[in-house]
Every structure is written in structure tokens, then in C-alpha cells.
Amino acid sequence: MILSVKKISSSVTDKDLKDLFDKYGAKRIDLKESKEKGEKFAFIYIPDKKNAEKAVKQLDGFELKGKHIRVKIKEEGTTQNKEPVKAEQKNEAQPQEKNKLPEKFPYAFFNRPPRKKPIVAFHDRLLDKHYDIAFEITWETLTPTALNPCIDEEAPSCYPKINKDDYSGYNRRWLTIDNHLAISPFTVKSAIANGFANIMGGCYRVNNIEEPHKEDVSKGQYLYSGKYKRYRVAMDGSSKPGIVKEIEPESDGSKKVTIIPVKEYYLDDDLPKGLNLNSGDTVYAKVIKNRGHKPPIIGGISKKSYNGSIELKYHGVFSYKRNSVPHPKHKHRFYTENGSEVTGTIPAINFLPENELKKHVSIGGADPEDKPTKWYQNLNTINVGSFVYYETFNGKVTNIGKNFLFKALFSHEDTVPEESSECVDLTGELCPRCRMFGMTDKKNKDLESIGFKGRFKSSALINDLIIEKSEKKETISIRETIKDENKNKEIITRNLILNEWVEKDTNNPIATQELLPISGPPKPNRRDVDGYFNKTTGEIKGAKYYLHGTLNSARNIHEVDKDENYTHRLRNYAQVARPHLRFTGTVGAENCNLEEIATFIILLHSDFSHHGFKIGLGKAFGMGSVKSYINRIWIRRKDDYENWHLVKNEDLSEEDLLKSLENSLNGITATYQGLKETVNNTIDIINKLDGMENRVLKYPDAGLNYWRMAFK
């Protein structure tokens, strides 16, 4: 159960709450501070219901560092602080219902309380209450699976050429060992690391390298691949009109702006003859046409009030587009004040000249056929009294533009909660995933590759069937658009030959060669509506876990080889193995505590309903789902370091497995059950399989809703 704790003194720390709630079996403490009220509050997770109720009874009203805290059981379906949602936050994505799949976005990774600790793992000795452990595991493919993002050097290089400058993928992306299909150690480690982070927690990793604007980006490539992202802000979403009241330059080049929100109106006619208006003058007019979220059209401009008129203020001639030219239809702009002032600091990068901005981020305009707009506005020309459009996040102004449709910019790093930021310093604290699987020390500028290699190791997982290439070949046709020097287009059909692999003794099909779309990164949408990180729900969007789909064939992926105008035209060969193949090998880890061992058991063996690892090239499409089984377990203890002890060598139930481990790992059952409860709370969110057998997986159409809805 989760307890809500309020009325907390500003001097109270996480340790104070831990000392207070430990005796009730608290597993997680999340201490927060309300920025608006300046008050601290906390959420305490206590798995045992009786202990949670006991804590409420004994600690509600308890004096802690001079204040009497309020403790009660957190109600379901409320926001974390139960404060009303502000008007400027009403468009933010609301928290998902418990155990309900995301309906509009295929990827999500949920925020966790900070759990970073110093490295306490060694390769030369075992720590107290730590163990070396090894597992012989079997992975069974649940869907067609594109096995490996690795290269078979023995296969000759070839690829389907589409256009002159397009990368289209190579055909050497599979791995066999002595004529057996195999899953590479890198693929195994990556999949287990992602599952480990889903249970134990992990840092959020983003691309924080500044990549400049590229003039030669070709069709299908992603414009914003570096630290800074740009996204479209429009009136139909979060763009709001206002008048600049104050601008305060900061020492770092940023500017604090104060804006008076307004409601705007357009006049499509010339001003009446003899009516001379200056900015800010009061007039009266009638609304002659309402247009939904767009500004109303007015008429009947007069200096005096009359029946049916409304009072407005005049701003000036209406201009639009990034270079602020007069609008051909709407000639004048009027407004009324509409709400309380809002403020916010706009980072210095937004005010850079065009040539300087291009050193940090793409400004668009890469490929004329894709029609991306090259967009730059000199925001330094915005002054007090200027009419602007702005965007807010958590009640603060975050971006401004001269028109209702503008390109906003943010640093990808800003979307990550501070307590979940990437592990970059070996001398600091590391998240559970990096402590187990390793990381690179990015703060050490002298040594490029220094890092912590991690305590986890894996072999390749190998299938027991002997395979060979079939004499049978399949020919598929793909349509290509060819351009000559004068940019004239011609659509041609190209035939491609795809291989098939069969079991040597029976000639049964084992794997096929497919041409899969290359999975591109998600584009940055409006951050405060449906973007990367929602600070209300603690949700970050990115490829952290994947929905599963049960497919009969890789060809279920929508229009993989048919439409030459398909958004993801770039292709990559893949060797797609059939469902229900089994791959066996060994994985292990050094210096594991009980919580880490319990996590591995949950991932690798337990009855984790609907769970499946996502591996290979097809995972973004719902392919590559595998189920894991533990065959054997070996343990090495500190008091008998020279010997490995076999503690499991048969097919055991979950209960019997824990009993057999308890003899060597005292306390593993209680640790396992505590973690399993956390897993069960999100079981219908992570890797759900049920009900997807008949679903066709596809990318969304290009346009404003790109990556908003990936499944229909």
C-alpha cells in the first residue's frame, strides 16, 4: 500500500523518513517538495497491508522536527499531491488508469524513486551477503523473431539500392555457429538489462551530443538526432497569444519574460475611413464569425459602444509567417486581456543568430520532396508591447514565437527528472542497471574508453537444429522512384531475391530472409501535451519497453515491400526465425545481493504472465518476443569460494525453486516475494500479449500526429 505523508518540516530528509517508517516494512520512500507552496510531502510504499494501517494509526499526528505530520493511505486515482490541475496544465497527458495499456503511444518508461548508490562491486573478492551466480537458460521465440543486430563476415555484402544517397541496409545481419542459429551475447545482455531496469530501476539515457544543422539530410533520415530538439507549436495545441509586459535579460544570455495572456480577434477589412488607431486604443466591434480554436472575425469597428458590440483593444496590422509579412486576408489584429500574467525564462540558445543556432540544432529544410520548413525567427526583435505566442509547462513560459505556429526548442536532457539522470561518473552514484551491467565514465576527458564493465556476462544462446540454406528462393518486387539529373521521376519495379533456411534432416523451414523497415527515432512532439516527459505522471516516452504482437509472419508489418511512398522507405535485410524455436546458453553475474538475484529469477524463470523479452531488429514492430526458462543454477559463496554449487537441476515450480535456493541463499524467498508484488502491479502494462493475435502492426502516417498513434 502507498501512504501519503503531508505537513513535513522543511528540514526533514529521506533518512529521517526511513528511520521512522523502517519498522513498518517500508520498501520505498519518495520525498518531494511542492514548488508552488514550498512544502514537503512524501509517498511511502509498504507492501504489507496490516503494517501500512499500523503506520497510519501510530504516526498520524506524530511530531517530526517540529511539525506534526499527517499520514494516511493514498487514495486511488488521484494525482501525487492531490492538488487541482491548473488551467494551463489542462492539456497535459493525464495519468493512466492502473493496469491499463497506453492507447496512443507504444512506448513508455515509468518514473521511479532515486536508487543510485556508490559502486561496491569487486572482481577479486566476494562481499558479505553477496554471491556469484550462473544460470543455464533457454529462450523460446513467441513470435517471428529477427534475431541479431550483428554481422556475419562470411556473407558477401549486398543491399537493395533505392536512391543514390539513401542508406538501405545490408544483408549480413544474422549469426550462425556451426550451422546452428544463435543469439549473440550482446543481444542477450541488452534484453536482460532492459528487463532488469524495468524491475529495479535505471537511469534515463539520452543523446546529449550537440549535432549541428545538416544541409544534405536525405529523405527518411531524422533531422533532430542530437542534444537539442525542435518541435512544432500551434494554436490547436499549446500556442497561446499574449502581449509582452516585461523582458529581463540574464547574465547567461537567457531572458525572463512576463506576458499578459490575451484573446485575439481579426479584422478582414480596412479600418473605417477617418478612424486612426494606435496600439492599445480601445474600440468596439461585433463578432461576425466564430472559428473554433482560431481567432474570431470581427466587423463594425467604432470608437463608441453600441448594441451587441464588445470592447476590444487595437494592436496593429496583422502579420504572419516566420518573416512576419502582412496577411493577405486578415488585415488588423485586436485583443482583450484574458487571464493572469505568466512568466518564464527562455534559454539563451533561442536568441542566437541563425548561423550560430545551426551549430547546435537542425533548423529544417533538408529535402524539398519531404517539404520540411526551414524555420528561423530572430527573437531578439521581440520587445515590451510585442504581440507574441507562447507555450507553458507547469505554469511557466517555456517558449515564445512571433506567430501562432512556431518552432520551439528544448534540450533533450531537460526531459529527464534530475534523480533519474544518466550515470556518467564512476566516482559518484550509479543506478541499479549501471551497477550491474556497466557504464562509461563520461566525465573522464583524458581516457576515452574508461568505464565500469559491469558484473554481468553472457554466452551466445544456440539452437540445437542444424540448418542449411534452401535451394528455394523467393522473389519479391518493390517499387522505386528514380530521378534523373533534371529531377524527373520514373517509377520502376525492382525484383529482390530472398533466402530461406531449413532444417537439414527434415527440410522444414526454420528462418526466412525479410526486408524490414528501418526503425527511426520518435520525433519530438509538443512537450507539455504529449511529449517526452510528463512531470505529472512521471512518464518518459522512448524505446524502453515494447508492446508485443503475436504475428504469423514478418509480412504482417504494414506494406513493408509495396508502397514506394511509405514513410519508412529505408529497408534492412533480416533473418526472421520462426516461432517456438529454443535457444540455450549460460549467463551469470558476480557479487550479487539477494535483491539482484531475485530480479534475475523473476526475469529468467518465474511465471511472469505476459512477459517476454524484446530482441532483434523487429522489436519496434512487435516482433522479437521471447520467453525465458531457467534450466540450472550454480552459486558460489564467500565461505566456499573455490567451489560452485549446483542448486537447481530439474524443472521446479516457483515454490519448490525458492525452497531449494533458500538453503544456499537465506532470505531469498521474502526478497523475491517483495519484488514480485511490484512486478504484479504493472503486469498488464509491461509486454502484454493477450488480445493481439489479430492485430496488424504498422507505423503511423507522416504528419502532425507522427508517433502519436502507432497502432490501429
Image: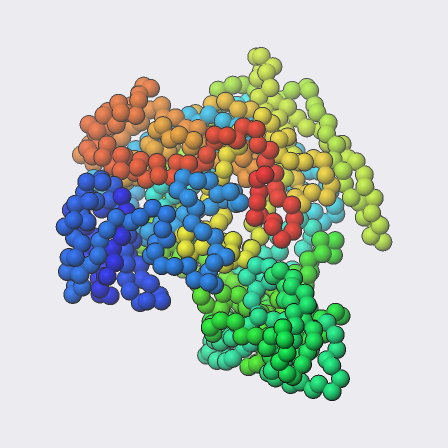
Residue 5 vs residue 117, the one in the foreground:
5
Quadrant (top left, top right, bottom left, bottom right) of the C terminus = top right
Quadrant (top left, top right, bottom left, bottom right) of the N terminus = top left
Q: x%, y% of residue 22?
A: 18, 48
Above or below for 208 versus 172:
below
Q: Along the horizontal axis of the image, is 391 left or right of 192?
A: right
The answer to whether residue 97 is seen in the rendering is yes
Residue 403 vs residue 570, the one in the foreground:
403
Q: x%, y% of residue 536?
A: 41, 55
Q: Residue at x 69, y 52 (%)?
A: 218
Q: Which residue is drawn at 78% across and 44% down?
A: 481
Above or below for 528 versus 277:
above
Q: Along the horizontal axis of the image, is 279 left or right of 394?
A: right
Residue 632: quarter of image: top left
Q: Which residue is drawn at 57% across and 74% down?
A: 336
Q: Residue at x 79, y 36 (%)?
A: 493
Residue 386 vs residue 491, the one in the foreground:
386
Q: x%, y% of residue 140?
A: 46, 25
The answer to whether residue 426 is seen in the rendering is no
- List the single residue furthest toward the front: 307
